[in-house]
Image (spheres, rainbow, N blue to C red):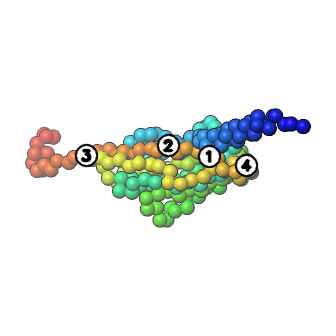
């Protein structure tokens, strides 16, 4: 008995293996993590939301480290965003490095017993100006999001920018010239 189909089976198997390798090499895009507003302008205080998009349908927990320039802005409050606080189950949120901030904000949050779905804000950060007329990048240094099975949710973090208002100049005047203006 002769098997004339063996070369065809071998070539089909090789072609199928090549397709699997090519499919594995294609990058998988993930959920979008964004900062809102972006760009952000702060003169005194500014609240920035960290948002996830609608592609996230089963978020149970997250850990992020957000990076900024501490010579430009300083965080004064970091809390769970409305998506987390509006969950139908209890939630957990902590600003891990609130006592030693440096150049980053380290947060950890989870819903306890249910999932939330995007779009919406998972973290809300409030900044104050440190230096006038400057700008700071706002980025994700690291992070992870997890679903109900504790599996990672791939994501892409889009960087943000925080700009501070220019300083307001003050002119020195003699008291007599100021008094003259109001007479």
Quarter placement of the N terminus: top right
- Mark 3 or mark 1, earlier in chain: 1
The alpha-carbon separation of the residues under discs 3 and 1 comes to 44 Å
Choose mark 3 or mark 2, whichever is in front.
2
Q: Is residue 25 left or right of residue 172?
A: right
- Mark 3 — residue? 168
Which disc, if any, is residue 158?
2
- Mark 4 or mark 1, earlier in chain: 4
- Mark 3 or mark 2, earlier in chain: 2
* Residue 177 at x, y percent in the picture: 10, 45
Quarter placement of the C terminus: top left
The alpha-carbon separation of the residues under discs 4 and 2 comes to 24 Å
Is residue 118 visible in the rendered image? The answer is: no
Depth check: give the residue in front, 145 or 117. 145
Number of other residues with Cα within 10 Å of mark 1, as a class: few under 14, some 14 to 19, many 20 or more: some
- Mark 3 or mark 4, earlier in chain: 4
The alpha-carbon separation of the residues under discs 3 and 2 comes to 32 Å
* Residue 182 at x, y percent in the picture: 15, 40
Mark 4 vs 1: CB contact within 8 A: no
5 above or below 145?
above
Mark 3 vs 4: CB contact within 8 A: no
163 above or below 12?
below
- Mark 1 — residue? 154
- Mark 4 — residue? 148
């Amino acid at each position: 008995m002769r098997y004339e189909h063996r070369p065809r089976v071998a070539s089909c198997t090789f072609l199928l293996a090549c397709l699997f390798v090519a499919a594995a090499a294609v990058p998988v895009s993930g959920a979008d993590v964004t900062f809102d507003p972006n760009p952000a302008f702060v003169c005194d205080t500014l609240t920035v939301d960290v948002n996830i998009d609608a592609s996230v349908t089963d978020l149970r927990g997250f850990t992020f480290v957000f990076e900024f320039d501490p010579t430009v802005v300083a965080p004064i409050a970091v809390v769970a965003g409305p998506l987390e606080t509006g969950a139908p189950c209890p939630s957990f949120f902590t600003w891990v490095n609130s006592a030693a901030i440096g150049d980053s904000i380290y947060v950890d949050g989870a819903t306890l017993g249910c999932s939330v779905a995007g779009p919406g804000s998972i973290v809300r950060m409030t900044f104050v100006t440190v230096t006038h007329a400057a700008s700071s990048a706002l980025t994700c240094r690291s992070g992870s999001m997890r679903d109900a099975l504790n599996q990672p949710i791939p994501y892409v973090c889009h960087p943000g920018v925080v700009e501070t208002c220019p300083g307001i100049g003050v002119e020195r005047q003699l008291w007599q010239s100021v008094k003259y203006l109001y007479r």
